Amino acid sequence: MSKRFRYKGQTIKLDFSEKWTELVKDYFHNRFGVDPTFWEPYKIFNRGDELWVASFSLVPEGVRIVKAGLRLLRVKGNPKPTTVALQWLNKHISKNVVYTDIETLSKLLNGAIIHVSNFPKTTTDGEKGYVALAFQNLIIGCGHISSGGMVKSQIPAGKARELKEILIRLSSKDLS
Amino acid sequence: MDRYAEVIPDFELFKACLQTPQPHYIRINTLKISEEEAISKLSELGFVLEKVPYLKWFYKVVGTPGYSITHTLYHWLGWFYVQDVAPGLVSPILDPQRDELILDLSAAPGGKTTHIAQIIENTGTIVANEPVTGRLRSLQANTHRMGVLNTIITQHNGIMFPDSGPFDRVLVDVPCSGEGRARETKSRQKGAEPGFIESISGTQKGLLRRAIQLTKPGGIIVYSTCTFAPEENEAVVHYALQNEPCEIVPIDMSDIPHSKGLTRWQDMEFDQSLEHTVRIYPHQLDSGGMYIAKLRRL
């Protein structure tokens, strides 16, 4: 099923095809260990090159939709999860997590690429692909691990800037 | 503000209150975290929080470790929303129910939208409308941060919002002169300019009329402002009562300090039912100011 809407002269298509739900279930189960039944209450839809998750019960006709729900995955090329989706999934993620501390997270946010062995803890076997970055046992966003085991932050620049300020405050508290 | 001396109770207390800094209140976001865990983690950081007895999930920040509660990882992760108690009363008064279709006609930055989503536990559908492109960004960011999934964000001029729905409930929190935010912004303490009040009240009337038209018969509309000006409050609701099929629904605030809506102001007489609308002054709740009216579409 899909619905089309007019917005600023363009047609926006929300595609609720079952194949997108299956893709999301498979991807998050295989890569992050999310139980496929987790998705049962939600609607998954494609918009452009992205998959979104939502819980709204209907889409009203006649309105200009700017955004609906939460952006989950970019599906152009290899699927890439969004930072906000991984934060939302948090406790449902059970593998491919890289646990950071203030030092390693600060470096990642400043653009450093760090070998996976240098983090306090991981639940990844080092397989190339996207990982969930954790801090204080909370999922904070998306990272990427290369075939050589090098980890890089994928947290968007604006969110990374905000997080860096929080870390600076935490560091100064630890030192005081 | 002196023009309100006859209608604001304890006017000297009111004026003195405007000179004091407005405290921070937070609403714990149970879409993301349990109330207990959030309070425990914030307390570990050194924040001292006092539960607001009349408003579910709200806490007053009465002590900090030397920095703002917005500069924490937990705020960044959407565990709570910094929201004053006066606007925090608006969504519970709308009383949204699970699985309903709800419209928030002027939604940015999203405090009330995310509050509604929390009350109905991400069920139903909220259409969160914001006409101003620059303000859409904050609305999108806050719905994402708070884990709100039942919301469709739209961009329309609210007065010309297209025929849609009809909606079970509509919140119309209108742009206003913002006198109720005088504790946050010193320049507002002298009160709003009459010319601005006159021009904005036309927009407010148009928004409220459209909100009523978009509501299904029997459905609920809540009109709110953060100003004291009767021209933007009772006069607007009185105008709607005269021009649209609707009636006032009394707001039950028996346990919460507040004042009744006005039934007369200077040479204006308003519908008697407007005494069942609500005025909140800063010295009553140690908050900002608010006006709230609840209507039923006939």
Image: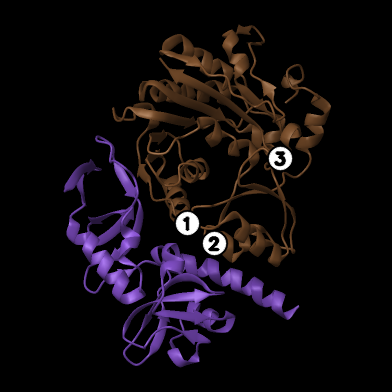
Q: Badge 3: few (under 14), some or many (20 or more) residues near its Cα, within 10 Å?
A: many
Q: Quadrant of residue A144?
A: bottom left
Q: Which mark is first along the chain, 2 or 1?
A: 2
- In the rendered view, tell whether residue B178 sits above or below residue B239: below
Chain A display color: purple
Q: Amino acid at mark 1?
A: Arg
Q: Are marks 3 and 1 on the same chain?
A: yes
Q: Which residue is mark 3?
A: B183
Chain B display color: brown
Disc 2: which chain?
B
Q: Which mark is first along the chain, 3 or 2?
A: 2
Residue A50 point in image, percent of width and height: 26, 61
Give the spatial CA distance, label 2 vs label 3. Answer: 26 Å
Report helix, strand or loop for mark 2: helix
Q: Which mark is first along the chain, 1 or 3?
A: 1
Q: Amino acid at mark 3?
A: Arg
Tags 3 and 1 in contact by the CB under 8 Å rule? no
Residue B23: tell me if it is visible.
yes
Disc 1: which chain?
B
Residue A169 point in image, percent of width and height: 65, 71
Q: What label sits on residue B145 in the rendered view? A: 1
Tags 1 and 2 in contact by the CB under 8 Å rule? yes
Q: Residue at x 60, y 69 (%)?
A: A166
Q: Badge 1: few (under 14), some or many (20 or more) residues near its Cα, within 10 Å?
A: many
Q: Quadrant of residue A98?
A: bottom left
Q: What label sits on residue B76 in the rendered view? A: 2
